[in-house]
Amino acid sequence: MSVPNNSLFLSVLGITHTVNMLILNKTAGVFFKPSRRKIYAFLGSFHFHPGKLFLHKLVLGIETSCDDTAAAVVDEAGNVLGEAVHSQTEVHLKTGGIIPPVAQQLHRENIQRIVQEALSASEVSPSELSAVATTIKPGLALSLGVGLSFSLQLVDQFKKPFIPIHHMEAHALTIRLTNKVEFPFLVLLISGGHCLLALVRGVSDFLLLGKSLDIAPGDMLDKVARRLSLIKHPECSTMSGGKAIEHLAKQGNRLHFDFQPPMQRAKNCDFSFSGLQHVIDKMIMQKEKEEGIEQGQVLSSAADIAAAVQHTVACHIAKRTHRALLFCKQRGFLHQSNAVLVVSGGVASNLYIRKALEIVTNATQCTLLCPPPRLCTDNGVMIAWNGVERLRAGLGILHNTEGIRYEPKLLGKKLFLYHK
Ligand code: KG4
Ligand code: ZN
């Protein structure tokens, strides 16, 4: 991996003389970051020549746990000062899935540029950072390793504290950057590699209530989309499996197929998707026989299957979440009058699934909150924000980088995309 050197950051260091101020826009009632020109004009009116003055602590977040190289600078007040991301999806689509050494190589090729872009966009130099926060678990070992070794060289060079980040903690806390949400709240994380329900009691205080016993819902939707060969469907060729299913489902009739949600009698909050996936696979095989087509061609009933699959997945997720909400409310684990359910992860961008969860939260008098889609999927902002949260709470801030290791634990995520 190429080492960040001083010259790398010269351009960043060259961007100086800015004042990072927050001004309350009374008309809009929101905070915004004014342009540098406006700040100078404002300060100039007081005959004041600014040096650099940051009102808040600044954290650089770095994410390389799977197939996105992402970085962002976020300040203590939750302002995203700069961010950059390089997605590897296009390359992995060609090979039909993530090949870890390829992901590693792409992270290596891009991490320096992505970090530099995030810093440049934020007009912050490495020496002005309060800390560097980086995902160290869970994820693909080879991918995590790139982000970690880059970060450790950076913190050693600039003598900055290092904050190791748990990817799931970062997903769960993102909502506190976009909304005013107090602890405790219930979080549902649903993506290609994640599926869990947890009570979030504090920055690093999570009570796991349920998880998938096999694969994650996004992984299952990707597999079904691949089995349906949706890449060959003209409207779906560039979409992820889950997005393709959502798109086609709008044109289908879910009542043409009857799939049962899994684990209906299980008295816990766990999930399961692989049994359902096998039932769907069998159904697709049967339909191919009926329609007299080969595997690899798109069924005429693909939209109906997509609608039924999406409905069954939505029911399963909603039922397990309902159990968790009732459990938390009965035990007094959530605020009685203002219980909050936070849903995040790539699958949370599915509007049908959101609707199902809305029914559950309405029935239990809870508030449903989702970060905006770009913050639901993997990104550098959530890592930087987790760093801010830990910095404020004084948790897990390391001043000595010796012995820090990444902890992979295979996500089972997107190793095979639906395109092959
Ligand atoms: O959070 P994410 O970008 O990466 C992981 O951490 O996994 O989520 C990607 C997953 C993929 O499995 C993809 O098929 C699924 O999220 N996904 C969707 C939708 N958009 C992406 N699933 C259902 N409906 C969608 N609209
Ligand atoms: Zn993730």
Image (cartoon, rainbow, N blue to C red):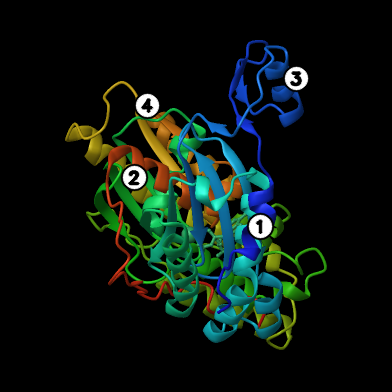
In the rendered structure, are the residues bearing label 4 and label 1 in contact, judged by CB atoms less than 8 Å apart?
no
Image region (quadrant) for ligand 1? bottom right
| Amino acid type for the residue under numbered disc 3 | Ala
In x, y percent, where is residue 93? 68, 77
Residue at the (47%, 80%) spot, across then down: 142
Q: Secondary structure at mark 4?
A: loop
Q: Is mark 1 within 8 Å of ligand 2?
A: no
Q: Amino acid at mark 1?
A: Leu
Between residue 105 and residue 204, name the one nearer to us. 105
CA gap, disc 3 and disc 1? 27 Å
Q: Quadrant of the N terminus?
A: bottom right
Secondary structure found at label 3: helix
Q: Sequence order check: which comes first, mark 3 or mark 4?
A: 3
Q: Nearer the viewer, mark 1 or mark 2?
A: 1
Q: Position of residue 9 (x, y in %)?
A: 62, 59
Under mark 2, the amino acid is Arg
The residue that label 2 is drawn on is 390
**What residue is disc 4 on?**
365
